[in-house]
């Protein structure tokens, strides 16, 4: 199977959606990445915030879900996931950019996320900075990262 490239805009699209409209596709990506690949328990993965959050959903040209992220009403960003086969193609960056565009519309003072320590450099490219000490979440090392709204590039 050929790998899709970020430079080909027809390869995938990203939409902002709700859990109510696209739960099956959002659940598919997060189950593959967090539950099966990273071995996070289902009890930790699914929470009450899905229903009240905005979700970015990446869909490939065949209509299959390949990535997701969510934005909570308080400005927290989380559940960023791209299927393994599609990593390294810019999809994660495009998802984050789409979520940041939605964040900017809300007028909140700063974006906040808990990043896996292996993803710190990815988020730093978007202007996020580490804000605090490393901690464990779902058995994986994380750090809190923040991005002031004035730093968001559209």
Image (cartoon, helix red, strand yellow):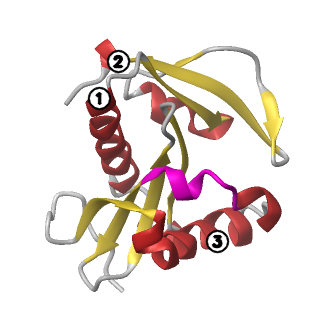
Whichever of labels 1 and 2 marks the residue nearer the N terminus, that label is: 1
Mark 2: few/some/many CA within 10 Å (<14, 14-19, 20+)? some
The answer to whether residue 41 is visible is: no
Query: Which mark sits nearer the N-terminus, 2 or 3?
Result: 3
Which residue lies under the disc numbered 2?
149
Q: Please name the residue that numbered disc 1 is placed on.
A: 104
Please give the label number shown on residue 61: none
- The tag earlier along the polypeptide, 1 or 3, is 3
Residue 51 position, x and y percent, is 54, 58
Left or right relative to 139: residue 65: left
Q: Are marks 1 and 2 in contact (CB under 8 Å)?
A: yes
Q: Position of residue 60 (x, y in %)?
A: 30, 75
Which region shows up in magenta?
Answer: 46-54
Cα separation, mark 2 vs mark 3, equals 31 Å
Is 47 placed above or below 59 here?
above
Q: Hey, which quadrant is residue 153 in on the image?
A: top left
How many residues crowd mark 1 within 10 Å: few (<14), some (14–19), many (20+)? some
- Residue at image position (21%, 71%) is 11
């Amino acid at each position: 199977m050929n790998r899709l490239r970020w430079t080909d805009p027809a390869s995938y699209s990203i939409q902002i959606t709700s859990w109510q409209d696209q739960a099956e596709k959002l659940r598919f990506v997060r189950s593959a990445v967090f539950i099966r690949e990273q071995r996070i328990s289902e009890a930790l993965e699914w929470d009450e915030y899905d229903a009240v959050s905005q979700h970015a959903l990446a869909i490939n040209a065949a209509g299959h879900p390949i990535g997701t992220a969510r934005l909570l009403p308080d400005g927290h960003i989380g559940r960023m996931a791209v299927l393994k086969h599609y990593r390294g193609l810019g999809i994660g960056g495009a998802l984050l950019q789409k979520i940041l565009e939605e964040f900017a519309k809300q007028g909140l003072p700063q974006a906040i996320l808990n990043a896996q320590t292996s993803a710190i450099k990815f988020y730093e490219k978007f202007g996020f900075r580490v804000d605090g000490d490393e901690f464990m979440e779902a058995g994986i090392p994380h750090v809190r990262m923040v991005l002031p709204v004035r730093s968001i590039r559209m």
